[in-house]
Each structure stands twice: as C-alpha cells, then as structure tokens.
Image: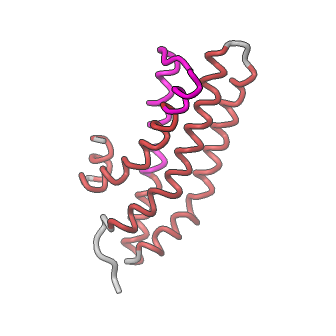
Amino acid sequence: FLLLVIAFTSIRTGFIAMIPNVVPIILIGGIMGYAKVNLDMITAMIMPMILGIAVDDTIHFTNHIKYHFELTGSYRSAIENSYREIGKTMIMTTVILCAMFAIFLTSTMNVLVNIGWLSIVGLGSALVADYTITPVLLYITKPFGKEKK
C-alpha cells in the first residue's frame, strides 16, 4: 500500500489502486484452502510474487489513465485510450508469464505443479481485476479531479 501511495503521490489513489490487487491474493488463498494445498515456504512465495506483478500492471494502467485524463478531461476517454494503448500489452505479458508457469505443470514434483497452477490462476485473476475493477473505481471515485465539460 505504501509503495502505491508513493508511486501515485496520493493516499486516495494508492488505496484505490490497492483494491484490485488484493483480489488475486484472496482468490489464491481461498483456492489453496479449498484444494487443501499446504501453505509452506514455497507456496507462500506465490502471493507476494503475484501481488508484485499485479501492482506493476495497476501502476502502468492507472498512470496511463491519469495521463489521458489530463489530456482529455474525460475519465471515459482516458480509460478507452488506455485500453487501446496498453491493453494488448497487459494481456500479452500475462499470457507469456502463464505459459512459462504452465511448464511447471509437467513436473513430477507436486510443489512445482502447485506453483504452476496457482501462479496461472493468480496472474489471470490479476489481469481480470486490473481490466475490470481498476477502471470502474477510477471512473466512480474520480481521483484525478473533476471532468471538464
């Protein structure tokens, strides 16, 4: 949270940006409990890793929205322009990372298989949260100021 506040130089925007990033962490924790995956030193590293990647995407996406808002004065235009500019890149980086973690699924070691599928679920849910929750929160809360008419 503190790093997001520093990155955005705003407590409000930092808090808003943190909300979509807890979604994959909660999901991974819930799935681990449901699937009876032991929380050990290896699987415990998945959550901070996913959080770091999710926060990176959120910072890029939010900064693009802020930049376009400053140009257009419209949250809707800013969000649309940001999707157009970096949306495909966010998807491609997530797909590439998921493909790399999918290699772990072929392992005979159960801990590596768990890292693989939990990372894929975490990365996928982080992308979905960034694509859906982040723009909605920014549109509703309008942290960059009032829209220009």
Q: Is residue 22 left or right of residue 145?
A: right
Depth order, front residue of 115/60: 115
- In the rendered image, which quarter is residue 123 located in? top right
**Does 22 sit above or below residue 141?**
above
Q: Is residue 124 magenta?
A: no
Q: Is residue 136 left or right of residue 34?
A: left
**For the view shown, which residue lies furthest in the front direction?**
34
Residue for point 60% across, 24% down: 115
Residue 107: % across, % down = 72, 17
Depth order, front residue of 5/25: 25
**For the view shown, which residue lies furthest in the bottom direction?**
149
Residue for point 43% across, 69% down: 68
Residue for point 47% across, 14% down: 41
Magenta span of residues: 30-59
Residue 2: % across, % down = 27, 41
Residue 69: % across, % down = 39, 71
Depth order, front residue of 93/116: 116
**Does 99 sit above or below residue 69?**
above
